[in-house]
Amino acid sequence: MPKGIAINIGLNFVNPAAYGGWDGELAGCINDARDMNQIAIGLGYTASILTDSQATSAEVARVIGQAARDLVSGDICLITYSGHGGQINDVTGDEPDGKDETWVLWDRQLLDDELNGLWSNFEAGVRIFVLSDSCNSGTVARMVSFKRKFRSAEFASQYERRVNDAPRVRAADPEALRANYEANRSDYEVSQWTHRATVNASVILISGCQDNQLSSDGDANGLFTQRLKEVWNNGSFSGDYARFHSAIVARMPSDQTPNLFKTGIANPAFDAQKPFTIGTATSGSGSSGGGMSISGPSSFTNGTIPITFSVSVPSGHFFAVEVATDASLFNNAVNGSQRNDNNFYASWKVRPFLQGSPFTLPADAWNRLRQGASRLYYRLWCTASSTDWVSQQVSVSDSNASAAPSIALTSPAQTGDEGSPSITAPSSIPANGQAPRFQVNPGANRYYAVEVSTNPWYFTPQYSGQRNDDNFYGSWKVTPFESSALYPATFELPGTAWNRLRANATTGKLYYRMWWTDSPTQWVNHGCTTPDSSGQNAPNFMLSRDL
């Protein structure tokens, strides 16, 4: 059975004695490491964490080297780094920009050449996933540019710190790096010339910014790690690594664009998996991956309308859905005897295996499960047969039941109470499936309109002139304002608009928002779930594809 090892590194400080008196103070890096450590443990990894003085160059190399000895083909190693990033002169001529990128560890910098040497110790067939929330440049000119951009409305809307606080970035002080470089010059040059081995494992890196950008540090997390956690959404994200990267990029300011980089041996099955997956894409029962996914809204009104899930399985396969009031009920061997119709639903118990998408929880099951529940958990089974369990796979295994995604149930608005206007959709919709359906709640006695776009910037005034039928849909443009006797209501995107938008969704996702008004024909006391001023932050769903 495949296994996973996670190594989570975070430095809020470095050793001043090693960097000319500079301590490199940051705030969110250890939190990043701890949060990634918790994600890894929840997914079944054997995880270790190195912070500040523990994160020396020797110890980081030792722990990664030990992982290389312990992992075999089919296993995965997750390595996360949060701290300062830097650059030193490349003496070998293998870098187009003449610089080697570095991780700024407690005692010295760890070069990308040295990391390449560490990757070369892993067996062929091992998957390595690296997350680096750090800067890859520390020049004074870029720092000045960053401080100027920090004052922009776009960046300020993304950067969750007090408005008048000075920006904090994960770019090391150039003078400190120079002092460290001079003190270790011979060791660095030896490393640059000797760590040039071939990498036979498969490596995917997602970094916090491009080589010529800076990564911002926050009080709780780095901005990159914060957005990554939002996209991951406690495991409810269902796309592959490329879509994971794209979803993070969509939430970042233009000044900081995370990079996706691959090295080693190409591994399409690895590329196609849900991020952090331990099991391989060809694993059987009890594994996740294989092109299957299920997603639902992060929250849903506990009312008369049942929850709808977006489902995707490989072509020619069938599926079953399980929903429970407690994730531990998915562990059949331990808690199967505690299941009953009021706390557990399995479509395979009451109907044949299914095909297509979406899947709506039957009304009778919905009404039983939602009574007294504040949250519902779900998972997906996939089988190659329409009648039997053949080469079955599951999105969350029994042993990892605690990692199952969930939906928070919120109280419905009372009659005469406007409630909190909202619009939600599953986090992932099959690109070749039926048009998406949204759950909308404009509030009692109000009317609503829905907008869907291929780019969130089209919701902002400065880009509204670039809208056309291929990149933007507004229900108010083609039909009167919508109304419903039930709140929340269900709004389905018209098929013609769906076909145009999904064909032009170059980022692999669509964005949406809802307007409300007190009049069936006019904009009266109107409002919007994502105002124009923050339109770039509109929610979105991924367009998933069968693999």
Image (tube, rainbow, N blue to C red):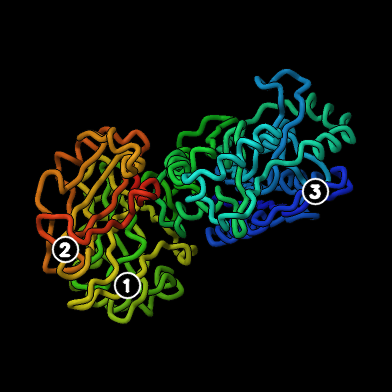
Question: What x and y, as percent, mark residue 173?
Answer: 76, 40
Image-quadrant location for residue 104: top right
In this rendering, the answer to whether 365 lies above or below 468 is below
Q: Which residue is mark 1?
A: 410
* Residue shown at 69% from the left, 43% from the top: 68
* Residue shown at 56% from the left, 51% from the top: 225
Image-quadrant location for residue 32: bottom right
In this rendering, the answer to whether 23 lies above or below 467 is below
Across the whole image, how many numbered discs are drawn on residues? Answer: 3
In this rendering, the answer to whether 110 lies above or below 94 is below
Q: Are marks 3 and 1 in contact (CB under 8 Å)?
A: no
Instruction: Tell me the tag on residue 518.
Output: 2
* Tag 3 secondary structure: loop
Does label 2 or label 1 sit earlier along the sequence?
1
* Tag 2 secondary structure: loop
In this rendering, the answer to whether 100 lies above or below 328 is above
- For label 1, the crowd category at 10 Å Cα-Cα, with few meaning under 14, some 14 to 19 and many 20 or more, is some
Q: Is residue 127 visible?
A: no
Of labels 2 and 1, the one closer to you: 2
Amino acid tagged 3: Trp
Does label 3 or label 1 sit earlier along the sequence?
3
Q: Which residue is mark 3?
A: 106
Does label 2 or label 3 sit earlier along the sequence?
3
* Residue shown at 40% from the left, 55% from the top: 395
Of labels 2 and 3, the one closer to you: 2
Amino acid tagged 1: Thr
* Residue shown at 65% from the left, 30% from the top: 199
Amino acid tagged 2: Asp
Left or right: residue 229 compared with residue 263: left
